[in-house]
Image: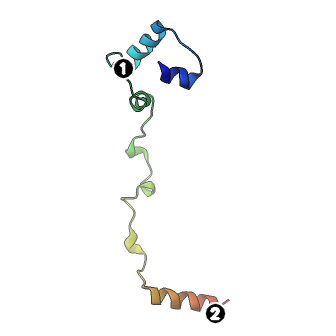
Amino acid sequence: MRIIMTMTGKSIDQALYYRLLARIGLVEKTVIHFSDFFAKFRIVPNSATYPQWMSSIAKNFNDRPVLNAVQVHTLLKEKARQR
């Protein structure tokens, strides 16, 4: 009950509290942690709805050339000289 009063800033009576718990499926719990309560309202997006480019697993890092420190330094020195 304290979670609801903290979130809404209003006090509620016992009957309304139990109706809410029954509606969200937490009426059988004696102790309700905030994470359990919040999980009932959190919307988890479906991973299939994400665009392919947002997935870090699908990123292909092989399309970039791999350079060592000396090659990068030489490349940057050349770019600086061209300015």
Q: Residues within 10 Å of mark 2 (few under 14, many from 20)?
A: few
- Classify 38 as above or below 62: above
Residue 37 spot, x, y in % from top left = 42, 27
Amino acid at circle 2: Arg
Residue in the foreground of this view, choosing between 54 and 32: 32
In the image, which disc is placed on residue 26? 1
Residue 24 spot, x, y in % from top left = 40, 20
**SS under mark 1:** loop
Q: Residue at x 43, y 76 (%)?
A: 64
Amino acid at circle 1: Leu
- Classify 54 as above or below 17: below
Residue denoted by label 2: 81
Q: Residues within 10 Å of mark 1 (few under 14, many from 20)?
A: some
Q: Quadrant of the C terminus?
A: bottom right
Residue in the foreground of this view, choosing between 49 and 71: 71
Q: Residue at x 41, y 80 (%)?
A: 66
- Give whichever of discs 2 and 1 has the lower sequence position: 1
The picture quadrant where one finds residue 58 is bottom left
**SS under mark 2:** helix
